[in-house]
Amino acid sequence: MEVKNWTYEEIPEFEGRPESAAVIDTTGDEPGVSYLHDVEYACIDGTPLHLQILAPTCRNRSYSPFEEQQAFSLPCYVFVQGSAWMPQYVYGNVANLAKLALRGYVCAIVEYRHSGIAPFPAQIKDARNAVRFLRKNAGKYGVDPEKIIIAGDSSGGHTSMWAGMLHDDDTPDNLFPGVSAEPSGIVNYYGSTSVMFPDSNPIQAKHCLPDSPEGMVMGGKNLLENPELARQLSVECNIDENTAMPPVLMFHGTKDRVVNCKCSEVVYEQLKKTGHPVDFYLIKGADHG
C-alpha cells in the first residue's frame, strides 16, 4: 500500500482475516468524548478561571482541538460545579458529564471565583461570562449558540438559577461585549437556593453566621442580623411575574442532609405562582449529590 495522506474514503480496507479473529461491524456513529483540560475563559483581578470541556466525537463527526471551526454544531450543557461557594474541585463530575457528552452534548464545567476572594454575585457573573465565552467561540468547540443550557449542583444550582435571572449584558461585568449570556434553559440539582429557614442546611450548625458558607459568600456577614442580605441571596425572594428567565428543570433528593429539599420546594412554588415554566422531580431517598 502506498504511503501518503489517505482520506478515510480512499484508504483500502484491510482484507486479511487472521484465524479466529472476530470482525465487528461499525456505522461510524459510535460515540467517544474528547476532553479539553483547563481552558481559560477569563482572568479577573489576576485570578484565571477555567472550563473543563467535553466534546462528543465519532468517525462521522470527528472533533479536532486544533481547528477553529468544527464541522458540527451541538447543544451545549454548561455545568457549574458546586462547592458551598468555596474553592471548587472542578474535575469531580467529569466522568458523570462524559455520559451526557456521549449523548451528543458539548459539556463545559465552570470554575467561578470562590467566596474567599469574591462575594456574591461574582459567581453568577463568572458563570454568565463562561456562557458568553462558549457562545463567542461556538465554532471552535462545536457549540450551537442558540442551544446553551446552564446547570449546576448545590451552590452551583444556586448559581445556575441566578445566571438565568441576572441580566447584565449591558454592564462592565460583560467581558465579551455584544455577546449574550442568556441560556435557553436552567437545570438545578439540589441547589442551595434559599437561606430563609433555620434548617436550610440540616447538618450545618452555623446557619447564616459570618463564617458559614452563606455568610462567607455574602462578604463574611451575619445574615441573621442582616435579613435583607439573606433575601438578596435567596432565589425565591427575587422571582416575580416580571422576572425574565428561561424554563427550569429541578431535581432534589428527599433525604438530602446538606441542603433541605424545602429550598427547592419554595423555589418551585414561586416559579409556578409567578407563571414561569418549571418541572420538579423529587428523587425518593436520595441524599445530597
Image (cartoon, grey):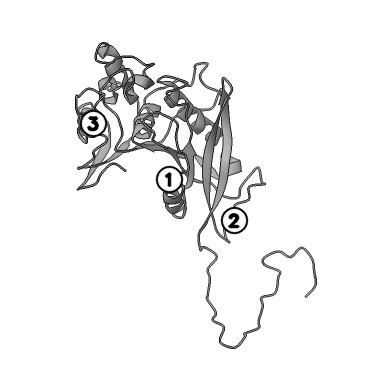
Image quarter hosting the C terminus:
top left
Judging by the rendered image, the residue that carries numbered circle 1 is 93
The secondary element bearing badge 1 is classed as: loop
Residue appearing at x 46%, y 24% in the figure: 125
Q: Give the vertical position of 227 relative to 255 (above or below).
A: above
The secondary element bearing badge 3 is classed as: helix
Measure the C-alpha gap from mark 1 to mark 3: 23 Å
Measure the C-alpha gap from mark 3 to mark 2: 42 Å
Image x and y of residue 138, in percent: 56, 39
Please name the amino acid that badge 1 sits on.
Asn
Q: Give the vertical position of 25 relative to 117 (above or below).
A: below
The secondary element bearing badge 2 is classed as: loop
Using residue 75 as the reference point, say whether residue 241 is left or right of it.
Answer: left
Q: Observer-nearest residue: 172 or 262?
A: 262
Q: Observer-nearest residue: 33 or 117?
A: 117
Q: Observer-nearest residue: 220 or 145?
A: 220
Image x and y of residue 239, in percent: 28, 23
1 and 3 marks in contact (CB < 8 Å): no
The residue furthest bottom is: 19
Of pointers 3 and 2, the one earlier in the residue sequence: 2
Can I make out residue 27 in this image? yes
Using residue 117 as the reference point, say whether residue 259 is left or right of it.
Answer: left
Residue appearing at x 61%, y 47% in the figure: 70
Judging by the rendered image, the residue that carries numbered circle 3 is 263
Please name the amino acid that badge 3 sits on.
Cys
How crowded is the residue under tag 1: few (<14 C-alpha within 10 Å), some, or many (20+)? few
Q: Give the vertical position of 269 relative to 118 (above or below).
A: below
Question: On residue 62, which mark appears?
Answer: 2
| Dot in front, 3 or 2 | 3
How crowded is the residue under tag 3: few (<14 C-alpha within 10 Å), some, or many (20+)? many
Please name the amino acid that badge 2 sits on.
Ser
